[in-house]
Amino acid sequence: MSQEIRVRFAPSPTGPLHIGGVRTALYNYLFARKHGGKMLLRIEDTDQNRFVPGAEEYILEALRWVGIEIDEGVGVGGPHAPYRQSERKDIYRKEAERLVAEDKAYYAFDTAEELEAMRKRMEAANAPAAQYNSITRLQMTNSLTLSAEEVARRIEAGDPYVIRLKVPRKEDIRLNDLIRGWVVVHSSQIDDKVLLKSDGMPTYHLANIVDDHLMGITHVIRGEEWLPSAPLHVLLYRYLGWESTMPQFAHLPLLLKPDGNGKLSKRDADLGGFPVFPLQWTDPFNGQVARGFREDGYLKEALVNFLAFLGWNPGTEQELFSMDELIQAFSLEHIHKAGARFDIQKAKWFNHEYLRRLPEAELAATIQQQAEADGLECSLEKAEKIAGLMKERVSFAHEIYPQSAMFFRTPESYDETVRAAKWNDDARKAAQVVRDAFAGLDTFTAETAKTAIAESLAAAGIKQGKVMQALRLALSGVGAGPDLMITLEIIGRDEAVARLDKALTQL
């Protein structure tokens, strides 16, 4: 590709950024970086009625957290500023008025009552769709049915109006989508969309076409929900005289519910007990809190890897990718057409895989903080040893401490099932000889503890395999858990001896 690749992510600040939006941003970013191009961030805030305070800041923070770097746009600046559509109204009006002057759009003065009456007439006539289109527009109040003088008088008087696109009556509109191939829609299926609203704000259809053109966007990579609008956008490019520089389109597959039936929603996430937002979000109007992947304990690397595979596959067996590796492997050709099932268990698997690769030192601070909150002392060395032992057994860093009670507290009770099956005379004798062996050690490590157990049991004529679960019961209160020798090293000699003493009196 000789031309510089320029892509954009253009969310609306109407609330928290949905995880599907994060995937769209990620695919744009990977594509741009793969081809040495630019990633733009544009805020599409033309619908002022749906504007939510804090949403724009949330979008910026979410993109920063997952590692998507913006080259140009909101928060960064650039040669095509401003990058908020609400600050570009004059640009859109100029283009809309040009389309009217060229007979490719028209003024429409219809009231809400007139539009409702039209819909009822269409329904009564069993029309397939109650649309404002090439047929019905000739029965409505617009600059196609009014005289030029009446139109001018109404505008001068301040009568509210919109500008609508004048869609041709009989024409096939074609689009070669990079993921879906050729899409052909007959113009009779497209209504005369509003381009400029009565408040002077553009609709998405006009604003995104004008901005993409002026900002030199070469590829529009967006969700499948925009595919029905794509032929309309192709028509707009032609009407505006920009067909030769029209970007290539790629419409991404939907994110489906975990069971694969239907589009993923926040309600599905609430019922399933998982987030659909990258970060926690507090609604500024009612104070309701929606959970976020970050606050739930997901590592950004795991989330990025999980999202990358929701609709794309590298064509190899590799599943774990760094961001740089994703950039090198990514291609639009490997994006699926079918919807992608949102398997939260797979997300947890990715998090586990990345967690177990983290250095113990990165996990130790969380363990220390949780222990100290419980009034327990925990040295950095101890926390690192616990992290090294337990990170293989959990999906999230915050799960390590709650599953580490054995490292901080002497057992208060013992598993009755294991006690009934394993605690016998041999077990009691084994606990005593091991206790004495431990007490005589000057250096207490996993290796010295292992040797002491083997040698003391051999000297007592006890087969190690028959009593190890009973020894674990005496030391931890349960019959299964992480490596017992490393556990012993973590709790230390004196604590191990004390626990065996207690077991010998209580079991």
Image (tube, grey):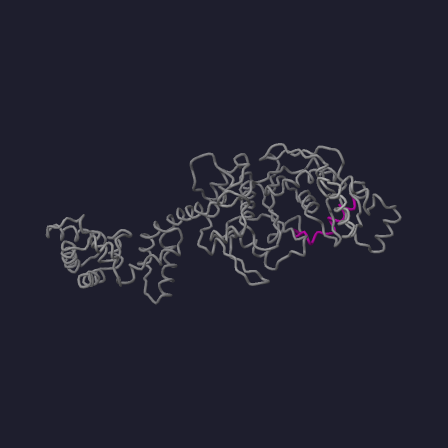
For this rendering, which residue is in front, 399 or 363? 399
The stretch in magenta equals: 82-98
Name which quarter of the figure residue 337 lies in: top right
Left or right of residue 79, residue 200 in this image: right
Q: Position of residue 300 (x, y in %)?
A: 47, 50
Q: Is residue 168 above or below residue 95?
A: above
Q: Is residue 330 above or below residue 11?
A: above
Q: Position of residue 86 (x, y in %)?
A: 69, 54
Name which quarter of the figure residue 24 lies in: top right
Left or right of residue 471, residue 219 in this image: right
| Number of numbered discs on residues | 0
Residue shown at 61% from the left, 35% from the top:
177
For this rendering, which residue is in front, 422 or 30? 422
Quarter of the image with the N terminus is top right
Q: Position of residue 140 (x, y in %)?
A: 81, 46
For this rendering, which residue is in front, 440 or 341? 341
Instruction: Tell which residue pokes out farthest to the bottom in this image.
Output: 375
Q: What secondary structure predominates along the stretch shown in magenta? A: helix
Left or right of residue 216, residue 113 in this image: right
Q: Position of residue 104 (x, y in %)?
A: 78, 40
Quarter of the image with the C terminus is bottom left
For this rendering, which residue is in front, 407 or 2? 407
54 inside magenta stretch: no
